Image: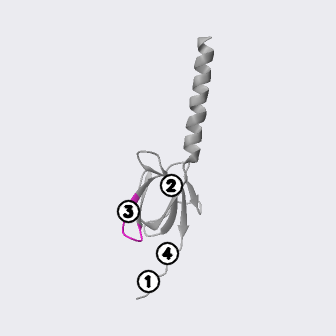
Amino acid sequence: KKWMMGLIISTILFVIGVAITSAQPYSTFVGKVVAIQRGAISVEGVKGEVLQFAVGRNTVYIPPRWPGIGEWVRAEYRFDGRRNVGYQMKIIQPPPPKKK
């Protein structure tokens, strides 16, 4: 009987955890790649801020290759409590220069 109660509580906690994780929306960040290292890509935004994204085998690259330094990307990511986890890195055309 105790194991049944433990199983029910574990199932409930699992379902709550999945619901919380799936409820987090992706954020988007657009900028130029300034650094690439194993497991991370750093991107400088148009206002000069730099975000580092953790990337790995689950990250989707469009087109299917790592971006190079100086290329512009649109990064879709989530903050997992410790770091920004990149889910998609799409190489895009740089924005047009601002008119004065």
Q: CA distance from mark 4 to mark 2?
A: 20 Å
**Badge 3 vs badge 4, beta-carbon distance below 8 Å:** no
Q: Which residue is mark 1?
A: 98
State which quarter of the image contains the C terminus: bottom left
**Quick one: label 2 or label 3, which is nearer the N terminus?**
3
Mark 1 belongs to which amino acid? Lys
Give the quadrant of residue 18: top right
Give the magenta range: 45-51
The x, y position of residue 62, in whole percent, is 59, 62
The x, y position of residue 8, in whole percent, is 62, 22
Q: CA distance from mark 2 to mark 1?
A: 27 Å
Residue 38 shown left or right of residue 87 in the figure: left
Q: CA distance from mark 3 to mark 4?
A: 16 Å
Count of all numbered marks drawn on residues in the image:
4
Q: Which residue is mark 3?
A: 50
**Badge 2 vs badge 3, beta-carbon distance below 8 Å:** no
Q: CA distance from mark 4 to mark 1?
A: 12 Å
**Quick one: label 2 or label 1, which is nearer the N terminus?**
2
91 in the magenta segment? no
Label 2: how many Cα within 10 Å (few below 14, some 14–19, many 20+):
many
Q: CA distance from mark 2 to mark 3?
A: 14 Å
**Quick one: label 3 or label 1, which is nearer the N terminus?**
3
47 in the magenta segment? yes
